Every structure is written in C-alpha cells, then in structure tokens.
Image (cartoon, rainbow, N blue to C red):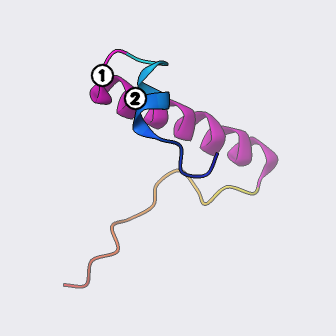
Amino acid sequence: MIEPKIDDLLSQGDSKYTLVTLAAKRAREINSYYNQLGEGRGEFVPPLVET
C-alpha cells in the first residue's frame, strides 16, 4: 500500500482534491503524535531554499 492506485483511492473520496485534503489532515495527525512523544521535528520547519 505504499503507492496505491488512484482509482482505489477515489473510492475513499469524491475527487483528487478531497484526497489531498485527507492526506494533509493525516500528515498533521502523525506530526502531532510525534511531537507529543518529543520525537517531532518541531513546530515550524523552515523552507529548504538557499538565498
């Protein structure tokens, strides 16, 4: 289930945009969980762009 087919994922949501929203929400949940454990990367990760 590392790279599921888009057709399988669309059965979970109405559109690709819904899937992106769900994935972002889940990523925030995972990040919050690791921050509670003290293993997170912090509250804010700056952009990795050299100026």
Q: Which of 31 and 23 is in front in this view?
A: 23
Look at the image and tell me in which quarter the N terminus lies. Answer: top right
Residue 3 position (above or below residue 14) = below
Q: Which element type, helix, strand or loop, lies under badge 2?
A: helix
Q: Give the dominant element type of the magenta stretch: helix, strand or loop.
A: helix
Q: Position of residue 8 (x, y in %)?
A: 49, 29
In magenta segment, residue 21: yes
Residue assigned mark 2: 19
Q: Which amino acid, by three-letter code, is at mark 2?
A: Leu
Q: Give the residue type at disc 1.
A: Ser
Instruction: Locate residue 20: give its quadrant.
Output: top left
Check the image and report above or below for 47 versus 25. below
Q: Residue 15 carries which label?
A: 1
Q: Does the magenta stretch include residue 34?
A: yes
Q: Residues within 10 Å of mark 1 (few under 14, many from 20)?
A: few
Picture coordinates of residue 22, whole percent (x, y): 46, 27
The answer to whether one can see residue 22 in this image is no
Name the residue: 77% across, 53% down.
38
Residue lying at the far right of the rendered structure:
37
Q: Quadrant of residue 10?
A: top left
For image coordinates 25% across by 84% down, the residue present is 50
Residue extending farthest left:
51
Look at the numbered discs 1 and 2 and tell me whether their residues touch, using CB distance below 8 Å: yes
x and y percent of residue 13 in the render? 41, 18
User: Would residue 3 be visible to someone looking at this image?
Assistant: yes
**First to last magenta residue range:** 14-38
Give the camera-side residue of 28 and 20.
20
| Structural crowding at the residue carrying mark 2, measured as other residues with C-alpha within 10 Å and reported as few (<14), some (14–19) or many (≥20) | some
Numbered disc 1: secondary structure: loop
